[in-house]
Amino acid sequence: NAGVMQNPRHLVRRRGQEARLRCSPMKGHSHVYWYRQLPEEGLKFMVYLQKENIIDESGMPKERFSAEFPKEGPSILRIQQVVRGDSAAYFCASSPSGTGRQYFGPGTRLTVL
Amino acid sequence: TQLLEQSPQFLSIQEGENLTVYCNSSSVFSSLQWYRQEPGEGPVLLVTVVTGGEVKKLKRLTFQFGDARKDSSLHITAAQPGDTGLYLCAGGMYGGATNKLIFGTGTLLAVQP
């Protein structure tokens, strides 16, 4: 029973490039969440999605960031025109229903040069 | 703004000792999760508590949710070096149009052999 999968595990981008982070939830889970962990800071909620719907994006920066969870395939967190301040660990979590029991993936470490 | 304060921030103890980590907030949560995170990995779910006053035991770990569902504690009996890691509490906010975890500030535990 595979857990939450994220790829890539490490991603290096230059300022101005685009970053695409992928997340495959656990089998049977239809709720996906993205969190960001900045250096020396705690985990912060970004967005909550169900299949084809964004339910809560209150934690997403207003510009350059977007997320989707299509009917088929993984959830994607997309960051356009990356800046150094975007360097962080991005974690995806999934749950079978809309409760707090969320299971996390190993994260994607994004480094912006 | 919901805030979860954990104490202590750092704890270094000898193998065999007991310890308690506290997680406090002024907000009421629908649930309270405890996670452990290793360097370079995602948080691993240890337990979920949902009822005020609830106590759950997981081998040498005892978790308690406060009566008012605003605070929680994690007690470890006879700590072992394998318990070393970052312990995170996370309050669940869900229902309606949201479903997210508010993470605590973290407790870094080191158990010396």
Image: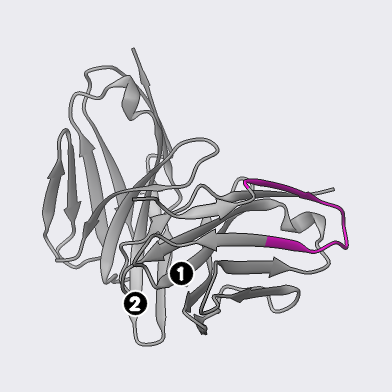
Q: Which residue is mark 1?
A: A32
Tell me the residue at 55%/53% (across/down): A6
| Residue A7 shows up from this direction | yes
Residue B48 picture location, percent across and down: 24, 57
- The quadrant in which the C terminus of chain B is found is top left
Label 2 sits on a secondary structure element that is: strand
Query: Where does the image place residue B97, in percent across and percent down from the top left?
Result: 41, 86
Residue located at (62% from left, 46% from top): A9
Q: Position of residue A110 (x, y in %)?
A: 70, 50
Q: Which residue is mark 2?
A: B94
- Res B69 → quadrant: bottom left
Image height check: is A33 above or below B57? below
Q: Which of the 4 image quadrants contains residue B81? A: top left
> Magenta part of the protein: which range?
A9-20
Where is residue A74 shown, x and y percent of the image?
55, 66
Q: How packed is label 1: few (under 14 Cα within 10 Å), some, or many (20 or more)?
A: many
What element does badge 1 sit on? strand
Same chain check for tags 1 and 2: no
- Amino acid under disc 1: Val
| Front position in the image: A98 or B35 | A98
Spatial separation of the CA atoms under disc 1 and disc 2: 14 Å
**Residue, x 34% and y 67% (percent of image)?**
A28
Q: Is residue B108 above or below residue A90?
A: above
